[in-house]
Image (spheres, rainbow, N blue to C red):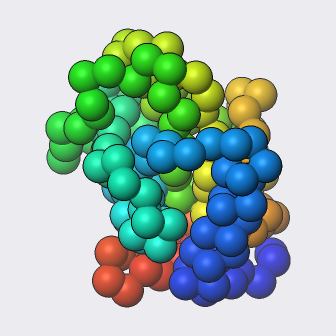
Amino acid sequence: MDEIAKPEALLEKLADDLKKLLVERGINNPLMVGIHTGGAWIASALHASLGITQPLAMLDISFYRDDFSRIGMNPKVKPSSLPPQVEDKHIILVDDVLQTGRTIRAAMNEIFDYGRPASITLVCLVDRSGRELPIQADIIGQHLQLGAEQHIKLSGPEPLEFVIT
């Protein structure tokens, strides 16, 4: 198993890399969207550090998942808070751990129910092996190799810590 960096150090890396990417792509005033729960914590920190002026949006993708039979329904469904119009907006989608790609697919399905964004930039704190869908992040804090039987979870929000089981 790889050694994992502290979440605070990864957040700094994400912020620096994201600033550079937004400049390269000429994106001003994007809409940042965090996926509940860990992605929302990361998005909140990035939103503040980048000084984004649009309100921070949140998604709970529980109703958009395609794997209820395997993982069950999340008993603590939270409301999503997207602006009524995402049409032609540049969206920064933030999650804590990218593994299978199913959470990101569900999040994009929900976003597209609100309209067609100009672009979606995916930012993830950790990218680990185990992809089931062809989804990759634009900005990653750390690539992590874990065994197939291992799982990583971000706990928080204060302090942010990784738990590997």
**Residue plotted at (62% across, 52% down):** 123
Counting the numbered discs, the total is 0
Left or right for 14, reference 144: left
**Residue 26 falls in which quadrant of the image?**
top right
**Residue 134 makes an appearance in the image:** yes
**Residue plotted at (52% across, 37% down):** 91
Q: Nearer the viewer, residue 95 or 62?
A: 95
Task: Provide residue 41's location: percent of width, then percent of height.
Answer: 38, 65
Quadrant housing the C terminus: bottom right
**Residue plotted at (48% across, 28% down):** 89
The correct choice, above or below, for 153 with respect to 148 in the image is below
**Residue 131 falls in which quadrant of the image?**
top right
Task: Provide residue 140's location: percent of width, then percent of height.
Answer: 72, 59
**Residue 66 makes an appearance in the image:** no
Quadrant housing the N terminus: bottom right
Left or right for 111, reference 135: left
Task: Provide residue 47's location: percent of width, then percent of height.
Answer: 43, 62
Q: Nearer the viewer, residue 67 or 25?
A: 25
**Residue plotted at (37% across, 64% down):** 44
Task: Provide residue 23's location: percent of width, then percent of height.
Answer: 71, 53
